[in-house]
Image (spheres, helix red, strand yellow):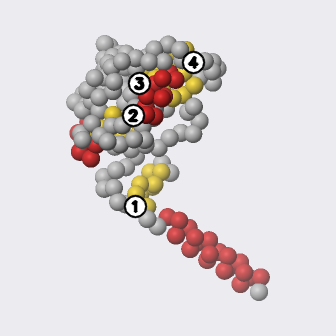
C-alpha cells in the first residue's frame, strides 16, 4: 500500500509538471515565452545584429521598439527634456506611447543593455543602425536606488556607456520601457 502511494504521488508530480509547462514554447534563462507572439524571445546570452535585435512596432504606431535580446519594448524617441528622478518615474508611469500605457523607468541593467561599448565618445553609445531617435549622448535615469546612498539612483551615461549614480534631486533624461520588471528596483 505504501509503495502504491509513492508511485501515485510520483505520477501526480510528473503530470503537474507537464500541466505547468504546457503553453510555453520556449524557456530561455528561466523566462517563458508565450506561443502566441512569434519571434519574441529573450536572448540575454546572445549579441544580435541590429537588424535582428530591434523591431519597430506597427501596433504602437511605430513609436515603440522591441528589443529581441531582452524582450523589452522601448519608446522609440525618448523625451529630450530633463527631470528629477521622482518626476521621471511619474512621467514614465503616466506615459502613453502608441496609444498604450504600462510604461516605467527601466532598471539599470535594462538601460545598460542598450549600450554598445564599441561606440566611443561622444556617443550616443547605441548599436550602429539602431532605430531610435532623440537619444542624447548624456545621462539617463534608471529606476534603481543606490544601496549605499538612498538619496541617489543609478544612471547610464550614453556619451561613454558608463554606469554610475547621481543624487535624485538632480535633473537628467528619462527613457521609458515596457515589459517585465525586477521587483527590487524602487
- Which label sits in the foreground, 1 or 3? 3
Of labels 2 and 4, earlier in sequence is 2
Between discs 1 and 2, the one toward the N terminus = 1
Residue positioned most to the bottom = 1
For label 2, the residue is: 95
Tag in front: 4 or 1: 4
Q: Where 34 falls versus 111 (above or below)?
A: below
Q: Name the quadrant containing residue 148.
A: top right
Residue 90 horizontal side relative to residue 147, left or right: left
Looking at the image, is 78 positioned above or below residue 165?
below
Task: Residue lying at the far right in this picture: please name it.
Answer: 2
Query: Looking at the image, is mark 2 or mark 4 nearer the viewer?
Result: 2
Q: Sequence-wise, which precedes: disc 1 or disc 3?
A: 1
What's the distance in space between the residues labelled 1 and 2, CA to CA? 31 Å
- Of residues 185 and 88, the one nearer the viewer is 88
Is there a contact, CB below 8 Å, between mark 1 and mark 2? no
Q: Position of residue 170 (x, y in %)?
A: 50, 13
Marks 3/4: CA distance?
Answer: 15 Å
Tell me, for residue 152, which label it has, or none.
Answer: 4
Mark 4 or mark 1: name the one nearer the start of the chain: 1
Badge 1 local density, few (<14 within 10 Å), some, or many (20+)?
few
Residue 42 spot, x, y in % from top left: 40, 46
Q: Earlier in the sequence, mark 3 or mark 4?
A: 4
Amino acid at each position: 500500500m505504501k509503495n502504491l502511494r509513492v508511485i501515485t504521488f510520483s505520477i501526480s508530480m510528473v503530470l503537474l509538471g507537464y500541466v505547468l509547462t504546457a503553453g510555453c514554447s520556449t524557456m530561455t534563462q528561466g523566462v517563458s515565452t508565450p506561443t502566441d507572439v512569434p519571434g519574441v524571445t529573450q536572448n540575454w546570452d546572445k549579441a544580435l545584429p541590429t537588424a535582428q535585435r530591434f523591431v519597430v512596432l506597427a501596433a504602437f504606431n511605430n513609436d515603440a521598439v522591441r528589443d529581441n535580446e531582452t524582450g523589452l519594448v522601448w519608446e522609440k524617441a525618448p523625451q529630450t527634456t530633463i527631470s528629477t528622478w521622482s518626476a521621471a518615474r511619474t512621467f514614465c508611469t503616466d506615459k502613453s506611447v502608441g496609444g498604450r500605457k504600462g510604461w516605467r523607468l527601466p532598471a539599470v541593467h535594462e538601460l545598460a543593455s542598450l549600450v554598445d561599448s564599441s561606440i566611443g565618445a561622444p556617443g550616443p553609445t547605441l548599436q550602429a543602425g539602431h532605430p531610435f531617435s532623440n537619444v542624447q549622448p548624456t545621462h539617463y535615469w534608471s529606476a534603481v536606488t543606490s544601496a549605499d546612498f538612498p538619496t541617489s539612483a543609478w544612471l547610464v551615461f550614453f556619451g561613454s556607456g558608463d554606469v554610475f549614480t547621481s543624487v535624485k534631486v538632480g535633473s537628467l533624461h528619462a527613457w521609458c520601457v515596457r515589459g517585465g520588471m525586477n521587483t527590487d528596483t524602487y
